[in-house]
Amino acid sequence: MRTLVFDGRTGAAGDMICAALIAAGADPDVLAPVSDALPVRYEVGETEKTGIRATTVDVLVDGNDTERVGTDPGHDHGHSHDHDHDHDHDHSHDTESSGGDDHAEGAGVHRTYREVVDLVESMALPAPVESTALDAFELLGCAEASVHGTDLDEAHFHEVGADDAVADVVGAALLLEDVDPERVVATPVAAGGGTVEMSHGTYPVPAPATTEIATRSEFRIVGGPIDRELLTPTGAAILGAVAEGVDAVPDLAVERAGYGAGDADFDRHPNVCRALVGDGGLPDSEEEEHDAQADHAHADHARDGGLVHDDIAVLETNLDDAAPEVLGGLQETLTRAGARDVTIVPTTMKKSRPGHLVKVICKPDDAEAVAERLARETGTLGVRQSGASHRWIAEREFETATLRVDGADHEVAVKVASTTDGEVYDVSGEYDDAAAVAAATGLPVREVLRRAETDVRERLADE
């Protein structure tokens, strides 16, 4: 199995991941769609970090158009939970490159989550690339919303919504597609140590957004090896969107190795993110090995005297409003759709609400059918495919339900989820709106939700 390993022993940032992929064999020419869509260009170079030759990637913008948003040229970067710190990039924004371009860090407009999604969707990217980029931005958006206590669609990006951050995320997705691994893994990533100064005060490393992304991802983080912030929110989101977590570099017949450099220089630790590409054999999960052996007679390819190579897909989604009866029935319904194993893990979600992480193992050919069944059964709006670059998400719209109680009208937003052909499969009232109406009228929250959802369902049935 062609495997890509990210080894972030001194952290990871968006530009470092892009540079590591190029050093490991990705063609930088695939980055053209980003330069076509944004007023930026990529500059690929080389440097040396503690005796190791490494690749660099800078995102540059025309010096005449650069907006130095959120920067102070006379000081180190101010750290903020919603800023990507470009892995301790210490260059001054007063310094132009030899080509008359400036570093694009923080340049361009700062966007909302929805604006970033619209921008990515407008780039006409290949479907797997678009899905990977949207997964990463969803992680960033959910982290931002969780830190601030807002909803995803209300999340505002600052540096991570600027042109350079979009270029890092979409660029990494394009380069990953060019490498074309069957499996992507990440060893524990160094987060650094000490504290960071943010707009809201001084916080310990890792910063709140990075920590929140880590809770939603499979890879693990580890403190150190120095007291600097080493893992940025953008770097964490990219890894979280594409990589399984492993304890160490797996058994790998290495074909290519590449090192992506950050700007800062450390005395004893090379400031690089390493990418390894090669034949990694079977995944190391015990569940996956069990499935492979059980399906021996049905496998398409086998090695004489060895284990059977059995490709699988891992699907997952977070749920914060699923009834126990629904969760209890998932084993049966998803198995009928093609799932080989279903695991449900209690977790804590945004606003400290209890929820569940549902993880499903299935054959790649069954992944879309299983994802659709998971969405229909639970009402979730998104299903991630871990370790790969595909995701199936619902078409979503908001309707407004008007409830008349004691002669007064009250409005509740209702989210409508549908398939791409327009078939509605879930109608879900927004809790905050329902809670406000319940407080004003004395009705139970669940009764407000029931009335609002019924109003929208009946209206849709009449259309």
Image: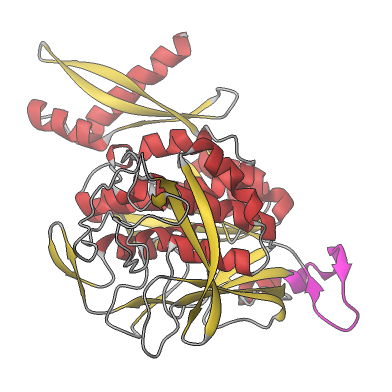
The foreground one among 246 and 374 is 246
Residue 114 in picture, x, y percent from top left: 38, 35
The foreground one among 229 and 375 is 229
The residue that appears at 63% across and 77% down in the rendered structure is: 284
Quadrant into which the N terminus falls: bottom right
Residue 358 visible in the current orientation? yes
Please tell me in which quadrant of the rendered image residue 436 appears. top left
The residue that appears at 59% across and 82% down in the rendered structure is: 249
359 lies above or below 381: below
The foreground one among 109 and 293 is 109
The residue that appears at 36% across and 39% down in the rendered structure is: 65
The residue that appears at 23% across and 44% down in the rendered structure is: 150
Residue 247 in picture, x, y percent from top left: 51, 81
Residue 137 visible in the current orientation? no
Rendered image coloring scheme = secondary structure
Queried whether the magenta region covers residue 135, the answer comes back as: no
Residue 327 in picture, x, y percent from top left: 46, 51
Please tell me in which quadrant of the rendered image residue 44 appears. bottom right
Please tell me in which quadrant of the rendered image residue 20 appears. bottom right
187 lies above or below 211: below
Residue 361 in picture, x, y percent from top left: 62, 60
Give left or right: position of 395 versus 86. right
The part of the chain drawn in magenta is: 291-309
32 lies above or below 50: above
**Residue sitting at the far bottom:** 268
Give left or right: position of 364 versus 90. right
Queried whether the magenta region covers residue 305, the answer comes back as: yes
